[in-house]
Image (cartoon, rainbow, N blue to C red):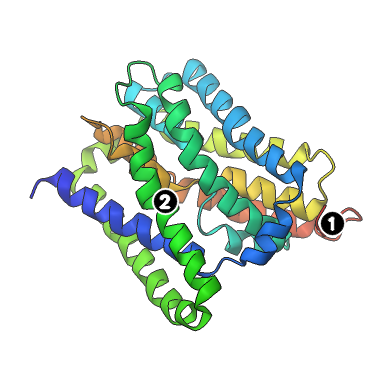
Amino acid sequence: MTLQTAFGILVILYSVANLASMGLELNLRETIKSLRSARLVILTLVWGWVVGPAFAVLLTKVLPLAEAHATGLLIFSLAPIAPFLPILVRKARADMDFSAALMPLAMVATVVLLPLMAPLLMKGLTVNAWSLAKPLLLLVLLPLVLGAAIKVYAPPVAEKLFPVVKRLAGISTLLILGFTVVFYFREFISTLGSYAIGAEIIFVLGIALVSYRLGFGLKQGQRSAMALAMCTRNASGMFAVFTAFPNPDPRTLVMILLAGPVPALLALPLARFFASQAGTPDAGGAA
């Protein structure tokens, strides 16, 4: 078994477990109710797939990034919202119903828009849109839909499955991180002397600030949820795309792996700050 095959198996386990666990705890009724807000849908799409990618392209022009790191940053910009968003939203005392609608919307949008936009943003990318979409459909959308279907049609089964699937998601995350550190240790170390980590930090803080300050009528609790959603990243989608590349560069993989800890470490203090603002007059409620 080659390293790439072994990593591919870990990616499947990681993606399926994380997205299935998200589906198993999804409140479909509240999600559908919140998705009726045109403002929510439009702002999610604009921040996630217009402003975010444009900001990433700007960073690749301004910062002296290696080509592989720049590719990783562009992939990073096309996959917003991490599965652990509800934890951050609770810490921020933000709008849970609003965030519940953001997550499935972002997952579907990632599956549709990432394959279409990646070839446009990454010069020299020879992979076609379907090659990128196929792993996203199988590893992101399908587990999410199956988990949500079980939650709707067999709630007792979902309740029993959720802790097992959640634990499997945590184990697979640790395995992927350990695998990459062991076999790509040199590439990890090389990021410390580059602008790779700095580029992700600037991106995360920038998109969080813009999406929070420019709420366009959203209440404080909704702006908090939106900012936390936009500053976290969906590593499952990025891994799925990475496995579709014919000759993937390990440095791009490192950038994708950093999409877990870098946004998480920045999002935690942001959530505390948003919580301190939750008592302001415009806080709470759905639009």
Determine crowd level at label 2: few under 14, some 14-19, many 20+ residues with C-alpha closer than 10 A.
many
Where 205 sits versus 84, above or below?
Answer: above
Left or right of residue 20: residue 2: left
Question: Is residue 258 in view?
Answer: no
Residue 73 percent coordinates (x, y): 44, 31
Q: Where is mark 1, residue-wise?
A: 283
Residue at position x 54%, y 20% from top? Answer: 58
Instruction: Select label 2 or label 1 by which is in front.
Output: 2
Q: Residue 273, relative to residue 169: is it above or below?
A: above
> Dot 2 corresponds to which residue?
140
In-image side of 107 versus 186 (left or right): right
Disc 1 element: loop
Towards the viewer: 216 or 147:
147
The answer to which of 145 and 282 lies nearer the viewer is: 145
Residue 181 screen position, x and y as percent: 25, 49
Q: Are discs 2 and 1 less than 8 Å apart at CB?
A: no
Q: Quadrant of residue 4?
A: top left
Position of residue 284 relative to residue 180, above or below, is: below
Mark earlier in primary sequence (2, 1): 2
Q: Nearer the viewer, residue 199 or 81?
A: 81
78 left or right, relative to 184: right
Give the percent coordinates (x, y) of residue 22. 50, 63
